[in-house]
Image (tube, rainbow, N blue to C red):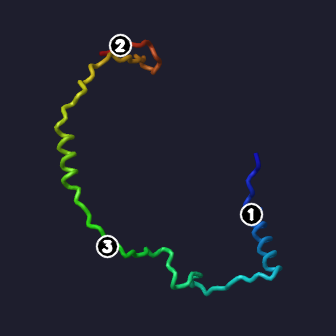
Amino acid sequence: MKKPKTKAQVRAEIEAQMTDYLQRGGEVAQFARGESSLSPSLHPFKVQSSDKPTESRTSVQDAVAAIESRRKTHPKSKAPMSKRPKKVLIKDDFGQPLRWVWEE
Protein backbone atom coordinates (compact mmCIF):
# COMPACT_ATOMS: atom_id res chain seq x y z
CA MET A 1 0.00 0.00 0.00
CA LYS A 2 1.28 3.42 -0.95
CA LYS A 3 1.97 5.80 1.94
CA PRO A 4 0.03 9.09 1.84
CA LYS A 5 1.99 12.30 1.37
CA THR A 6 2.81 14.30 4.46
CA LYS A 7 1.76 17.93 4.81
CA ALA A 8 5.34 19.05 4.29
CA GLN A 9 5.55 17.07 1.03
CA VAL A 10 2.26 18.55 -0.22
CA ARG A 11 3.42 22.09 0.66
CA ALA A 12 6.72 21.55 -1.14
CA GLU A 13 4.92 20.17 -4.21
CA ILE A 14 2.53 23.15 -4.36
CA GLU A 15 5.44 25.59 -3.90
CA ALA A 16 7.32 23.90 -6.76
CA GLN A 17 4.27 24.13 -9.02
CA MET A 18 3.83 27.83 -8.19
CA THR A 19 7.47 28.70 -8.91
CA ASP A 20 7.33 26.73 -12.16
CA TYR A 21 4.18 28.62 -13.21
CA LEU A 22 5.71 32.00 -12.38
CA GLN A 23 9.00 31.16 -14.17
CA ARG A 24 7.08 30.30 -17.36
CA GLY A 25 5.57 33.79 -17.34
CA GLY A 26 2.37 33.18 -15.46
CA GLU A 27 0.90 35.95 -13.33
CA VAL A 28 -1.08 35.88 -10.13
CA ALA A 29 -3.97 38.35 -9.98
CA GLN A 30 -3.88 40.46 -6.85
CA PHE A 31 -7.11 41.38 -5.10
CA ALA A 32 -7.67 43.88 -2.32
CA ARG A 33 -8.53 42.47 1.07
CA GLY A 34 -12.25 41.68 1.27
CA GLU A 35 -12.72 41.89 -2.50
CA SER A 36 -14.20 38.90 -4.29
CA SER A 37 -12.65 37.38 -7.38
CA LEU A 38 -16.13 36.87 -8.82
CA SER A 39 -17.59 39.56 -10.98
CA PRO A 40 -20.54 41.34 -9.36
CA SER A 41 -22.83 40.43 -12.26
CA LEU A 42 -22.43 36.70 -11.56
CA HIS A 43 -23.96 35.37 -8.39
CA PRO A 44 -23.45 31.60 -8.30
CA PHE A 45 -25.28 31.26 -5.01
CA LYS A 46 -28.28 33.33 -6.04
CA VAL A 47 -31.40 31.35 -6.90
CA GLN A 48 -32.34 31.77 -10.54
CA SER A 49 -35.93 32.83 -11.04
CA SER A 50 -37.95 31.16 -13.76
CA ASP A 51 -40.93 32.36 -15.78
CA LYS A 52 -43.18 29.67 -14.34
CA PRO A 53 -45.79 30.83 -11.85
CA THR A 54 -45.35 29.47 -8.37
CA GLU A 55 -47.51 26.49 -7.56
CA SER A 56 -49.88 26.71 -4.65
CA ARG A 57 -49.07 24.39 -1.79
CA THR A 58 -51.53 21.82 -0.60
CA SER A 59 -52.28 21.42 3.06
CA VAL A 60 -51.46 18.02 4.51
CA GLN A 61 -53.32 18.51 7.76
CA ASP A 62 -56.20 16.27 6.61
CA ALA A 63 -53.85 13.50 5.55
CA VAL A 64 -51.92 13.66 8.83
CA ALA A 65 -55.16 13.61 10.83
CA ALA A 66 -56.35 10.53 8.91
CA ILE A 67 -53.07 8.70 9.52
CA GLU A 68 -53.13 9.57 13.23
CA SER A 69 -56.72 8.37 13.59
CA ARG A 70 -55.88 5.04 11.93
CA ARG A 71 -52.86 4.61 14.17
CA LYS A 72 -54.87 5.08 17.36
CA THR A 73 -57.67 2.65 16.43
CA HIS A 74 -55.41 -0.42 16.07
CA PRO A 75 -55.58 -2.67 19.13
CA LYS A 76 -52.33 -3.99 20.45
CA SER A 77 -51.69 -7.29 18.74
CA LYS A 78 -48.97 -8.48 21.08
CA ALA A 79 -49.92 -10.07 24.36
CA PRO A 80 -47.62 -9.15 27.24
CA MET A 81 -44.86 -11.69 27.69
CA SER A 82 -45.04 -13.91 30.70
CA LYS A 83 -42.18 -13.48 33.12
CA ARG A 84 -39.52 -16.09 32.73
CA PRO A 85 -37.32 -17.35 35.53
CA LYS A 86 -34.12 -15.38 35.95
CA LYS A 87 -30.72 -16.74 36.97
CA VAL A 88 -29.30 -14.76 39.93
CA LEU A 89 -25.82 -15.02 41.43
CA ILE A 90 -25.65 -15.34 45.21
CA LYS A 91 -22.50 -13.84 46.78
CA ASP A 92 -21.04 -14.10 50.27
CA ASP A 93 -20.23 -11.15 52.58
CA PHE A 94 -16.92 -10.55 50.79
CA GLY A 95 -18.42 -10.49 47.28
CA GLN A 96 -17.22 -13.94 46.30
CA PRO A 97 -19.69 -15.98 44.21
CA LEU A 98 -21.32 -18.88 46.08
CA ARG A 99 -23.98 -20.30 43.76
CA TRP A 100 -26.57 -19.53 41.09
CA VAL A 101 -30.27 -19.52 41.97
CA TRP A 102 -33.32 -19.34 39.69
CA GLU A 103 -35.70 -16.54 40.65
CA GLU A 104 -39.22 -16.10 39.30
Looking at marks 1 and 3 on the same chain, the residue that comes earlier in the sequence is marked by 1
Pointer 1: what residue? 10
Q: Secondary structure at mark 1?
A: helix
Pointer 3: what residue? 53
Pointer 2: what residue? 102
What residue sits 78% from the left and 71% below the top?
17
Mark 1 closeness class: few <14, some 14–19, many ≥20 residues within 10 Å: few
Mark 3 closeness class: few <14, some 14–19, many ≥20 residues within 10 Å: few
Q: In front here: 23 or 42? A: 42
As shown in the figure, which amino acid type bears the numbered disc 3? Pro
User: Looking at the image, is 40 positioned above or below residue 104?
Assistant: below
Return the x and y of residue 33 as percentages of the image width and height. 59, 85
| Quadrant for the N terminus in the image | top right
Q: Secondary structure at mark 3?
A: loop
As shown in the figure, which amino acid type bears the numbered disc 1? Val
What residue sits 75% from the left and 57% below the top?
5
Question: Would you say 14 lies left or right of 55 here?
Answer: right
